[in-house]
Amino acid sequence: MAVISSPNASSVKIKYDHGTGLDGKRVIKTKTLSSLKSSATNDDIMAVVNAITNLQQHALSAVNRIDNVSLSE
């Protein structure tokens, strides 16, 4: 039997560099945007991330898209 995958809402984790902590280690803080349409393109998501980042005082460190799917037979 074939497995059927159905896309669910995606999310994106945006990591910001907050500099160095008192212990000398890098401080990275993450913000998560959830319930993104699974049909959203990577270009669209990056445009939103860049717009949000322009409002932040900290530098963008990384962007991770997480796609969720439901599996059934």
Image (cartoon, helix red, strand yellow):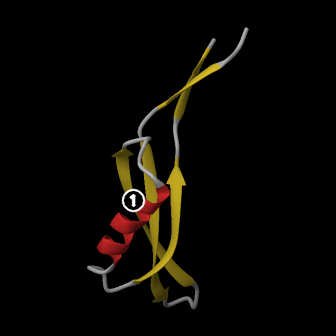
Q: Which residue is mark 1?
A: 44
**Residue name at image x 52 percent, y 43 percent:** 67
69 is higher (above) or lower (below) than 15: above
> Is residue 36 shown left or right of residue 43?
left
Q: Farthest residue in the right direction?
A: 1
Name the residue nearer the viewer: 5 or 31. 5
> Is residue 6 shown left or right of residue 55?
right
**Residue name at image x 34 percent, y 65 percent:** 48
26 is higher (above) or lower (below) than 30: below
- Residue 12 appears at what percent x and percent y? 45, 56
Quadrant of residue 47 within the rendered picture: bottom left
- Residue 58 appears at what percent x and percent y? 38, 84
- State the quadrant of the C terminus: top right
**Residue name at image x 39 percent, y 57 percent:** 32
- Residue 55 appears at what percent x and percent y? 26, 79
Name the residue nearer the viewer: 9 or 15. 9
- State the quadrant of the N terminus: top right
Q: Amino acid at mark 1?
A: Asp
**Residue name at image x 51 percent, y 55 percent:** 65
Q: Farthest residue in the top direction?
A: 1
Quadrant of residue 50 within the rendered picture: bottom left
32 is higher (above) or lower (below) than 30: above
Q: Secondary structure at mark 1?
A: helix
37 is higher (above) or lower (below) than 64: above
